[in-house]
Amino acid sequence: MEGVDVVDQLKLRASWGQLGNQNIGLYPYASFMVIGGDGQDYVFNNAHSPGAALNSMANSDIRWETSESTDVGLEFNLWGKLDVSFDYYYRLTKDILLPLNIPLTLGLGAPYQNAGTVENRGYDIMVNYRNRVGEVNYGVMVNFSDVKNNIVDMKGIENTGRTVNREGSPIGSFFGYVADGLFQSQEEVDAHATQFGNVGPGDIKYRDLNDDGMINDQDQTVFGSPIPRYTFGARLNADYKGIDISLFLQGVGKADGYLYAQGVMPFFLGGTVQQQHKDRWTPDNREASYPRLAWNQTNNEQTSSFWMKNAAYLRLQNLQIGYTFPRSMLESIKLQNLRIYVSGRNLLTFDNFYEGYDPEAPVSNGGWYPQMTTYTMGLNVNF
Amino acid sequence: MKRLIKIFSLIPLFLLTASCQEYLDRAPLDVPSDDTFFANETELEMAVTGVYNRLWFNTTEGMPYMFSFDFASDDGWDRNGGALQALGRGEQNSDNAYTNSFWSHFYRAIGRVNFIVSGSPHLADQMDSEKYNRLVGEARFLRAYFYAYLAELYGDVPLIIDIIPLSESQTPRTPKAEVVDFILAELDEIAGHLPSDVATKDRITRGAALALKSRVALWNERWDEAASASKTLMDEEGYEIDEDYAGLFLFGSEDSPEIILQVQYLRGVQTHNLPRNYLSRMALGHSNKKPPQDMVDTYDCIDGLPIDESPLFDPQSPFENRDPRLEYTLVVPGSRLINHIFDTNPEVEQVLDFSQDPPVLVENIEADHAYASFTGYLYRKHVDPANYPTDVSASEQNLNLFRLAEILLNYAEAKVELNELDNTVYDAINAIRTRPSVNMPPILPGKSQEELRNVVRKERRHEMGMEGLRYFDIRRWRIAHEVIPGPLRGRVNRYSGGGWLNEPPAIDEIGTPSYDNVSNANQMVVIETRNFDPERDYLWPIPRIELETNTALIQNPNY
C-alpha cells in the first residue's frame, strides 16, 4: 500500500440537475390595459384627463424556462500538501423567456416568448499547494477557468445594436463594421465603397462584406465578444521568521474591449479632444492610432472593429509585506502582539488596452471612475 | 354520513365539466384585460385619451416632434451631435434613432386606434351614438394624421387598420397612393361626426379634419382635393386670420380665431423643453437649435423686395426695414430676448439688462460662452417670455398643429398648380401678408403661373417658419438636393470681430440665398457641410430591426 502515502484523498463527482425560472411578472399570458400615467394621459380643457391603452402583447403559450446542468468533477490531495480540484460543466438553458423583437407595426410591446436556447460549457481548475522548507512556510493557490457561451437558437430574430444576441455567437457580441485601417489617399477613398458623409484620407475604411459598392447595415457582422475567456487568479504567500509576504495576481487571457463615444472619439458630440488624439492621421503620420481629426463627421463614429482592442490583462491586485515582532522582544514593553505592514492594491497592470483605461471595464464610453491604486501602512498592536 | 358521501361524489363531476387547465388560467382581477375592456362609455373616452397622449412625443432634448423636422431643413440645425444632426447632413441610416423613433411611436399610436376601432363597435348601441361616432372619429383622425407623416417620410408603408396577431404580422408595404386614399377617405367619413367650433383647440373638430385633408392632399399633389378641402374650411368653419402674428405663438393663443388645433400641456401633467432648446444662455436656455444665416437673409424688406433688390436694405444695418416676421420668428443680434440684448459678437462685452429699472449694463455671457449660438442667431417663435425663468425646461405653453394661414397657403398653392389664378388666390396670400402686425405690401395681380408659384413658395417659408413644414416643402418640391448640400453658415465673424456681410447675397425667386457674390462670405462661420443624395434622401430608411422582424418589408433604395 505504498500509494496511500501519496494520495491522501480522491473524489470523483458527477451531477445533473434541472431548474425552472418563472420570474417574469404575474400575467404574461394575458394582455391587460394600462390605466393612467405619463404614457396614457392627456390634457383637455386645461385639466388632467386619465387615459387607457393596451401596450403589450400577450403570449398565451408561455412556459417555464428550464436550465439543465451537467457537472463532472475530480478532487484529490497529494502528499497532504497539494489540493487539486477540477470541474467541467455543461449548462443548457432552454425556452429562455425573452421579449423578442416583434414588428413595430403591431403597435404593441413584445411579449415574453420561450425563445432562446443558450449553452455554456466551461471548466474550473483550482490548485492549492502548501509546504515548508526550513523555516520558510509558503503557499500557492491558483485558479483557472474558462467558459464558452453560445446562442443555439433565437427563433431567427436577430437584434441590432452595438451588442447583439445572435445565433451562433456569444450573448452580447459586438456587432458592426469590420475596419480595414485608415484611408491613405483620396484615390483610395474614391475607389472604395461609399461610406458615411464627407470621407477623406485618414478616415476609417470599412469592409464591403456584400460587395455592393455601399457600406450599409448589410455590411455589419459580429466582430468580437466582451465575455472574458481564460480567467485566472494566483495567490502566493510565504513567511520566514516573522516576515510575511502575500501577493494576489489576477487576469484574463482573452477578451475584447470596446470603447466608444467620449471615451475614445475625438470631438464627440461637438466636445473636446484628448492628449491621445495627437497621434491622429496626417499625411506625415500614416501609421496613426487615431483617424484624422474631423468635426461633426459620423464616418469614424460607426460601431466598428477599429475601436475594439485586446482587453487581456494581468494585474497585481494586492501585495502585502509585514513583520511580526518576536514575543521575547515584546514582553519587556508588555505587549501581546506587534505587527507592522505595508500593502498596496492595484499596483501593476500589464495590458495592451487603451492607455489610461481599465481593462476590467472593457466596454464603456469612458464615463466611469477607474479603480484607484491604494497604498496602506499599518500597525497592529494587541495589549 | 351518507349524504356527505353523496356530496363528495359530485365533486369529480365539476372537475370534468370545467377543465382544470381553464380553471387555473385566471385573468388578473386588479386591471381590466383587453377582452373585457370597452365595457362602457368611460372606458372608450379613456382609450381615446390614450391616443391623444401620443401627441406628446419629444425627439431630441425634450423637443416636440412636430417642429423638430425643420432642424434638418435649410432653416435649422440641431447642435446635439446625434441622430437628427446626422439626418440634416444626409448621413442617416437604418439605425438612426431619430428617424426610427417616428416609425415606432406612430405605429404605437396607430395600434391604439386600431384597438378602439376593432374593439368598441358594440358600444355604439349602448351609448349616445353621436358621441360614440365623435369619439371614434377623433381617434380615426389621429390615425390618419400619423399615417400622413409615415407616408410622407417613408413612402410606401404597411397600412394596418385592424388589430392583427403576431402570426399575421409579416405585412408588406402598401403603395403610398393607397395610404393617401385611405387617409382622405377616413377624413371625409369622420368630418360629419365632428363638431365645428372655432373655440375648441384641444379636441379634433371638423375644422381639424378639413385642415389635415388640405395638408395631405397638397403634400400628395392632389390639387383638386387640396383646394376644395381648404375652401370648405375657409368658407364654413369660421376661422379668421389673427391681426397679431406674434401672439399666435404665445400663451393666450388658445383664444386666437386662427388656431385650429393645438397640443395641450399642463404643469404637473406634461410639459416640454422647447424654451430650453431655443433660448440664449443668458435667458437660461441651451441655444441648442440654431437658425443659419440662410434663414435670416431669406426675408424680404418691407417694400416686398428681396434684400438684394430693395433700396431699403443697408448691409451695415441688415435687420432694419425687414419683413416683421423675421424678428417674430428669429432673434437677431442687437435685439432684445427676455431681459437682455442678444449678441454673440465677442467684442460686445456688456449688454443691457432690462430686468433692472433703469436698465443696466451687465457682462455679456453669450460673447465667450462655448455653447452660445454657433450661428449668432436664435429662434423666437413659440417661446413666450413668461416661461422665463422657472419653466424654461418645463413649459406648459400649448403648441400649434394647424392654423388657418397654412390652409390659405395650401389653397393658393393648389390653385396655382391647377392654373386657376383667380382673385381668390391673391386674396388668400394677401390676407396673410397684410395682417396689421405683418403689414407687408400685397401681391399685385397679373402674375404668371410660374411667378405665382414662386410667390407662394416664398410666402410659405416666411409665414410658416419653424412650424415643421419647411422640411416637407423642400422634399415635395424636390429642391432639397439643391438647397441642402454645402456649408451651413452662421453670421460673419461669430468668433472674432463681428461685422456684417459686405453685400447682400443673391436671393432667388423662392427666397433661397446664395453667397457666391459676397466678398467676405469666407468670414461666415461654417457649422457643418451637408449632403443630400437625391437618389436616397427623399425617403427615410425603414428601421433595421423592422426589416429583421418583418421579412415582407423591402428597404428604401440605396440604404
Image (cartoon, grey):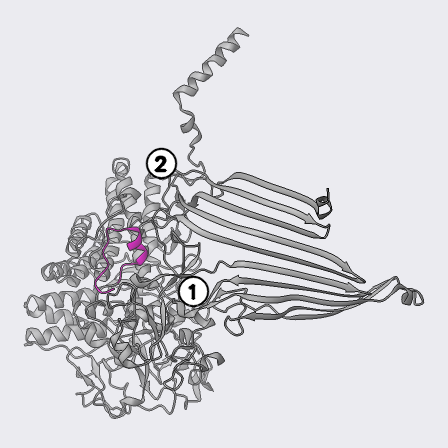
Range of the magenta residues? B541-559
Query: Residue A96: horizontal and vertical position, in percent?
Result: 44, 44
Q: Quadrant of the N terminus of chain A?
A: top right
Q: Disc 1 marks which residue?
A: B394
Say the numbered circle drawn on residue B36.
2
Say the numbered circle drawn on residue B111.
none
**Relative side of A230 to B125, left or right:** right
Instruction: Reply above or below: B205 against A244.
Output: above
Classify residue B270 by image quadrant.
Answer: bottom left
- Looking at the magenta stretch, what is its main secondary structure? loop
Instruction: Reply above or below: B314 against A235.
Output: below
Classify residue B234 by image quadrant.
Answer: bottom left
Q: Quadrant of the C terminus of chain A?
A: bottom right
**Disc 1 to disc 2, C-alpha distance:** 37 Å
Q: Which is nearer the eye, A241 or A318?
A: A241
The residue positioned 16% from the left and 69% from the top of the image is: B477
Helix, strand or loop status at disc 1: loop
Instruction: Reply above or below: A78 against A325.
Output: above
Crowd band around label 2 with a 10 angstrom C-alpha radius: few (<14), some (14–19), many (20+): few
The residue positioned 57% from the left and 63% from the top of the image is: A251
**Relative side of B512 to B330, left or right:** left
Q: Which is nearer the eye, B436 or A87?
A: A87
Q: Is residue B550 magenta?
A: yes
Which comes before the other along the chain, label 1 or label 2?
2
Query: Residue B72: horizontal and vertical position, in percent?
Result: 28, 71
**Furthest-top residue in view?**
B2
Q: Is residue B283 magenta?
A: no
Asked whether residue B375 appears in the rendered view, the answer is yes
Asked whether residue A298 appears in the rendered view, the answer is no
